[in-house]
Image (cartoon, grey):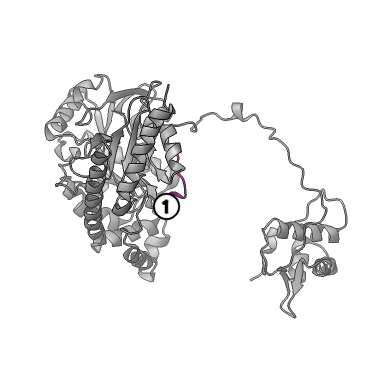
Amino acid sequence: MALPVETFFLHPDHQGTLQSQIQQMIAQGILSGRFQSGEKLPSTRKLALHLGVSRITVTLAYTELLSNDYLTSRGRSGYYVSRNAPAPPAFKPAPSGPDAVDWTRAIGNRYSGGQTPSKPQDWAQYKYPFIYGQADPILFDHANWRLCALQALGQRDFTPLTTDYYDQDDPQLIEFIARHTLPRRGISARLEQILITLGAQNALWLTTQVLLTQRRKAAFEDPCYHALRDILSQSRCHLAPVRVDQDGLPPDAIPPDADVIFTTPSHQCPTNGTMPMDRRRALLDRAREMDALIVEDDYEFEMSFLKPPSPALKSLDTDGRVIYVGSFSKSLFPGLRLGYLVGSEPFIKEARALRASVLRHPPGHIQRTAAYFLSLGHYDALIRRMGTALHERRETMQNAIAENNLQIAGQGAYGGSSFWMRAPENVDTVQLAATLQKQGVLIEPGESFFGGDDRPKHFYRLAYSSIPATRISDGVAIVAQAIRDAQTSGAIRK
């Protein structure tokens, strides 16, 4: 298959003959890597017709490039990029300069500069990746996911694969969530009360856009999921961070004028605290008293391998004031970006309209693949397998932490996939993480989870979801030694 003629065009300001311009255009394409070795060029007739020049002009250009070994000819089949293309010719590069636009003035809203930390893209190449939220290829059921994806590509599923749902979702996925997923959390919802999102983060963004204005106040946990703080800040609402304790968000500390309360009662992010039933009821009472709404991010409820999870806050709600956020991205794989919102119909109606105006709906093929994976029982089998593996890794890490005299600041009573750790107060874990990365160890500094100007710098998170149990003990020992070295060498926070 030849290179498309649309990739070739003559520059109106070029100085020189048409033949020389065609030669230079093809040579630059080869030398820049756009035209790969062995690729076929358009025929002289097609390229001449596309450029509006005579065929002989193109033929002469090809012949010159052939003589310089930029191209090679294969009998009657045409011209191809040579495998021995020479050094670049002496042509003047296209002029370039700074933008004429003053972007400091042109940009009306800024979304960069948030607190979301970056993770190495090649995290899997590190020997001790104590990082959260990445898929473990040892645990993921790739074979059955592939079969479900192929099934979703079949002729029978042509409509869900190709249709524009506009503001709707795959009916099979919605029905499974309503009949199987939500009842396990004690939630009963009609199909009209469920909306598929691009993961939990997209669900939180939709919720924030619908519920909050510049005059309204949002109460949220501190520390919390850093992306939530960024989302709330971008909405320009009034922010009311509430410091959590070992049981999560304390209802009495919520400002009385808060309009929306964001919480993670199953596994508080990042401390892993689980909100007791008495506090859940107290939180509902507090919200009723304030006439506030609650956004429940049911974070990591699937990872409750120590004992069954508590009922969701939404299941205790009799007023319709709780909006529930769920996600398959953490339990399946983060690149899936598939979550869902559950709430009263007036709210879901507005969230659905907003989603449609921004992205229509999550891809139909992804939704149908997930529906098959869930309905065929593969998801439940995966969760059981993950629970067994994470239980083993948790015990290994807990023992290694005790042996190395490290301090746990928070751990999930029901399970989870990480430990919230506290280093000595004079240790800056951002610097600690940089030191450990050079030794093949990845940890997550805790500073970005906190808000305000005086954020604690001595917390960090050790996750065990992406590291084999056999490597945990050695990795924890390296972390402990790095902390001791930081204290004795003076490489500590002043």
Task: Kindly state the secondary structure of the residue where label 1 is placed.
Answer: helix
Q: How many marks?
A: 1
Q: Quadrant of residue 346?
A: top left
Could you tell whether 492 is left or right of 300 in the image?
right
Q: Position of residue 405 (x, y in %)?
A: 26, 36
- Residue 384 rendering spot, x and y as whole percentages: 21, 56
Classify the position of the C terminus by image quarter: top left
Q: Amino acid at mark 1?
A: Ala
Look at mark 1 in the image and give the residue it sits on: 124
Residue 372 screen position, x and y as percent: 29, 62
* Residue 347 visible in the current orientation: yes
Residue that appears at 38% across and 52% down = 336
Nearer to us in this view, 235 or 268:
268
Q: Residue at x 36, y 38 (%)?
A: 481
Left or right relative to 440: residue 318:
left
**121 versus 273 height, above or below:** below
Main secondary structure type of the part rendered in magenta? loop
Residue situated furthest front in the rendering: 488
Q: Nearer the viewer, residue 154 or 395?
A: 395
Whether residue 182 is situated above or below residue 252 in the rendered picture = below
Magenta stretch holds residue 351: no
Task: Report the side of 326 relative to 112 (left or right).
Answer: left
The quarter of the image holding the N terminus is bottom right
Task: Check disc 1: other Cα within 10 Å, few if <14, some if 14-19, many if 20+.
Answer: some
Residue 428 in sight from this viewpoint: no
Res 102 quadrant in image: top right
Q: Residue at x 31, y 48 (%)?
A: 472
Residue stretch rendered in magenta on the structure: 117-123
In this view, the residue in front, 467 or 79, is 467
